[in-house]
Amino acid sequence: MSNVTAAPKLKTSAMIASFADPGQKTAAAPFGHALAELAERDQRVVGLSADLAKYTDMHIFRDRHPERFFQMGMAEQLLFGAAAGMAEVGLVPFASTYSVFAARRAYDFICLDIAEPNLNVNIVGGLPGLTTGYGPSHQATEDVAIFRGMPNVTIVDPCDSVDIAAAVPQLADHAGPTYLRLLRGQVPTVLDEYDYTFELGKAKVVRPGADVVFVSSGLMTMRALQAAERLAAERVDVAVVHAPTLKPFDEETVLRELDTPRLAVTLENHTVVGGLFETVAGALVRRGVSRRVVPIGLPDAFLDAGALPTLHDRYGLSTDAIIARVLRELRASD
């Protein structure tokens, strides 16, 4: 009889998979609750979905404000065309679907119906980056790259439930179109433990550090903070700069932190093509700052399907992978 203990199986629950760690503090459907609460104060707010209300947390809004919810069916172009019409008459629509469908399938409708006339339509994209165990049909690994090239669109990549709750009313107040990379379901609550407040268009230094500086967005800020805590045990002092607004980008704050001798690392839940890393690199070149930046992000490839913990390890997004990469870089520079 073998006495070898089998390793625990890594699980994912298909579309409802969570990137939260076991036992981590979370908040249920923060986007849906924030939108429903905003609608109590602002009668202009309406919600639309393309047959995915349950999977984008829009069902919270739907159940509390059924007269202001519009189910458009599996027709993303119609979803955003209708949202544009609502914005034209003074409403403030939040239109939700999966990021892949907004970025790939409905791009032309968003560009010409929403972005070109600079309408206040809030595009809410579920499953950004590697937040589902399903494969390339649902993994929006290039959505930021796609939307960064569209004029007038503000892009927000929130870290956690704190970011989302604060972002929703600010997106509604913003005059032009916005794109929110939605974290849904049981979303970790992380930033409440730091002296941090979400401010649209601003990056914030969440944690100081003398040896390494992380510039991160989205769920990778959570991982950056976890890695920083554990690296402290290795006597590595890590600063974390959270940049939740990817466009327009807060170059002043980020470059001030990068223009130092510290090891500089970007962390993003997105391909390294066209996302945070290249945004930072472009800003450095424009400002004449000459220095190396290490990118931690997804490869320029169609990714595998599988359990989220397995995939995050495989593609370098896990906390363990971040720590290993930083230690390798520090050893190589000694």
Image: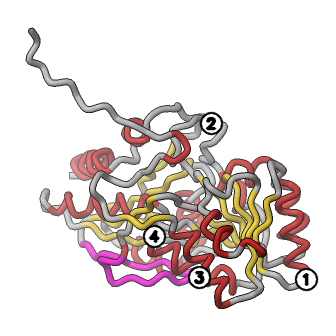
Q: Is residue 263 left or right of residue 287?
A: left
User: According to the image, label 4 marks what residue?
Assistant: 161
Report the amino acid beneath label 3.
Answer: Glu
Q: CA distance from mark 2 to mark 1?
A: 37 Å
Residue at numbered disc 1: 89
Q: Tell me, yes or no, whether the two marked residues, 4 and 3, touch with CB atoms within 8 Å.
A: no
Query: Sequence order check: which comes first, mark 2 or mark 4?
Result: 2
Where is residue 327? Give x, y as percent: 24, 49
- Given residues 158 and 147, the one toward you in this image is 158
CA distance for labels 4 and 3? 15 Å
The disc labelled 1 sits on which kind of residue?
Val
Examine the residues drawn in magenta and state their main secondary structure.
Answer: loop
Image coordinates for residue 78, horizontal then vertical, percent: 88, 57
Mark 3 and mark 1 lie on one chain; the one further toward the N terminus is 3
Report the side of 318 relative to 14 (left or right).
Answer: left
Apparent side of residue 82 relative to residue 181 in the rendered image (left or right): right
Q: Which residues, given as a range, are shown in magenta? A: 192-209
Residue position marked by numbered label 3 in the rendering: 37
Nearest to N terminus: mark 2 or mark 3: 3
Say which label, 2 or 1, has the lower sequence index: 1
Q: Earlier in the sequence, mark 4 or mark 3?
A: 3
Is residue 139 rendered to the left or right of residue 80?
A: left
